[in-house]
Image (cartoon, rainbow, N blue to C red):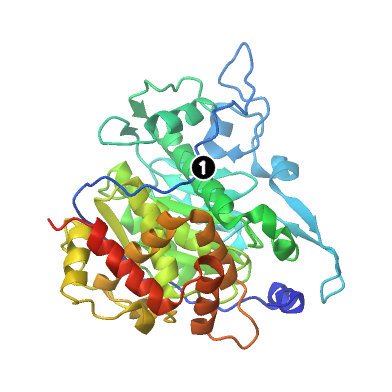
Amino acid sequence: MTNRQLVLLLLLGALTVPLAAQGTSSAKLEPPDVYAFPATPPFEPRYQHDEKRERIILNPDFFCSVCAEEGRIKFKSRDEMKDVLEQTKKFPYPLNDGTKERHHGRFRLMNRPAQDVLDFIYSKKQKAKNPVFIEDPQIRLYADLPGFSTKKFTWDRRGEELQLLSDIFPEVSEKTVVLNPHQHAHLYLIRAHRLLREFSWMVNVDAHKKDLEYLGPYLGCMEKFEIFIFQKKKNLDDFLLQHLGAAGEDGRCWHNLDDKSMATILHGQNLEDYEIMNTFTHRFCYNMLGGYRLYQYDLPAWVVLGFAHVMERRERTDFNTFIFGEAKVPDLPNVSKWKVHIRKLVVKDDIPRSLPEIADIENVAQVSVDEHLILWSLMSYLMQQDLQKTGVFFNVLKEKKEGESTRNNVIRALRTAYGVSIPVLWEQWREWVKETYPAV
């Protein structure tokens, strides 16, 4: 895609398909696959606290509605922090409208003034129990979540995440058992930033600065990532009806066409934190890949769905999220062990469609439930080989040439990153499954 085409996209926007039907299913808790992401950076406190009143943060780089109420930050409104939360990006050459700079971070949510959206969420009719709104230089997050016990379930990142929370809340330590609703909301901001950091490393954002120079400062999106986590499904449905005109099943992955930003929307009713975490991870990663270098066109369904499943199942394997686009949510798989099930399909040659048959399908509604499991495994195979090759693969998919078909784009991306064709990848993956997946 040429710089001129990118400029036109900036001015005119890109087409999008709303991803409505979404569901979840349970499976057996198994050891997750291991991927060679960089180790978590050593913990270094980023916030300075008042010596006499330790809860007060002297150098906040975020606005939080509850932190403001509790006096943890000196700012009482988001607009008092505009210099921190908004930025003006300069372009190397003028855009079509003659401008050489664009302001980003305007206080917007869901293609509207953010305050209008927050007024609806905070209205008496919604009866939110623990509403928290947080904004930092990359993300806007609304959460209405209960507190939870940090020792109720297996949680590999427990110590790491509690340590990061302690930078905001001095009363939190690695020994903390119960997090309150306010701390729970900040935990999801921490999780979102970890995913952004890992994805940015994988696609080697620094090496693609020239590709991003005409795009927005949020992985290429023009405005910030938006996250909405509702405690009650009814509140989620009311929000979707108010702002999108129709309620979804369990949430939405949404492209804000006017603002060119990505919104991750879900609820946590009757769910443990690890289940909310898995659903959030799946949808946020789907949006990261879709929004990276601007949402310009639909990527192949097997790539975005496979990546979302991989990142979700890195956390835990016993709760899985499915996105079906505009299709109705089908009966979800009652498969306790994904690898055993996939191996049986491969050995019996009982897979409905091969990768060569579905490689260029863009509409996620055309992917069957069983195929979701296959796409997870395919992407897991690619990512276990070399994560940065996967990043190259993603970047080439985001560089579709003028007139290039989706299939030819996939062919070029696989050859560039892995040196294989679609049929060769399919056969390599089949042999890998037979050799590495358990039979029972």
Quarter placement of the C terminus: bottom left
Nearest the viewer among 185 and 121 is 185
- Point out the residue furthest to the top here: 52
Amino acid of disc 1: Pro
The percent coordinates of residue 292 (x first, y second) are 58, 63
x then y, percent, for residue 372: 30, 68
Residue marked by disc 1: 38
Which of the pair 110/377 is nearer the observer?
377
Q: Quadrant of the N terminus?
A: bottom right
Residue under the image location 50 percent in, 40 percent down: 190
Instruction: Look at 78% across and 54% down and name the residue there.
Output: 88
Q: Residue at horizontal 64%, vertical 59%?
A: 223
The picture places residue 282, in percent across and down from the top left corner, at 39, 57
Vertical placement of residue 258 versus 86, above or below: below
What is the quadrant of residue 147 in the picture? top left
Q: Which residue is drawn at the image coordinates 54% and 50% (left, top)?
A: 196
Quarter residue 211 falls in: bottom right
* Residue 266 seen from this side: no
Which quadrant of the view contains residue 246? Answer: bottom left
Using residue 104 as the reference point, say whether residue 395 is left or right of it. left
- Counting from the top left corner in percent of width and height, residue 429 is at 33, 67
Total marks shown come to: 1
Q: Is residue 37 visible?
A: yes
